[in-house]
Image (cartoon, rainbow, N blue to C red):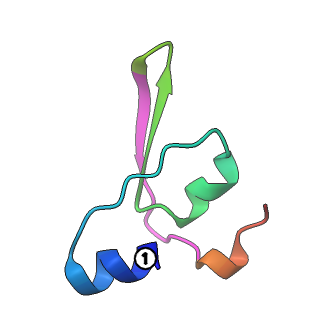
Amino acid sequence: MLKKVTEELGKTVIIVTHNTAITGIADRVVRLHSGEIDFVRDNEEPLPVEEIRW
């Protein structure tokens, strides 16, 4: 559903989680450490949700 919103409506979805498995579906990953941005990584080939190992 969230992927559909981004594609069809052109909206940005932000997911905040401790589950790093989810980063595979993201277009961009921003990691925070101690309240500061640790790194920003663009994901050139995001995985389909069905391929994520939870």
Q: How many labels were placed on the picture?
A: 1
Name the residue at 49% across, 43% down: 16
Density class for disc 1 (Cα within 10 Å; few <14, some 14-19, many ≥20) is: some
Decide: is 6 above or below 23. Answer: below
Q: What stretch is highlighted in magenta?
A: 37-47
Position of 40 compared to 10: left or right? right
Position of 20 compared to 1: left or right? right
Name the residue at 49% across, 71% down: 45
Residue situated in front as seen by the camera: 51 or 41: 51
44 magenta-colored: yes
Position of 42 compared to 12: left or right? right
Q: Please identify the quarter of the rendering in which residue 49 is found.
A: bottom right
Decide: is 44 above or below 34. Answer: below
Q: Where is residue 9 in the image (x, y as percent from the top left)?
A: 22, 81
Q: Dividing the image into 4 quarters, which one contains the C terminus?
A: bottom right
Label 1, secondary structure: give it.
Answer: helix
Name the residue at 68% across, 81% down: 50
Q: Position of residue 30 (x, y in %)?
A: 42, 39
Q: Position of residue 47 (x, y in %)?
A: 58, 73
Identity of the residue furthest to the bottom in this view: 8
Instruction: Name the amino acid, label 1.
Output: Lys
Position of 18 compared to 37: left or right? right
Name the residue at 23% across, 69% down: 11
Q: Please identify the quarter of the rendering in which residue 10 is found.
A: bottom left
25 magenta-colored: no
Q: Mark 1 points at which residue?
A: 3
Identity of the residue furthest to the top in this view: 34
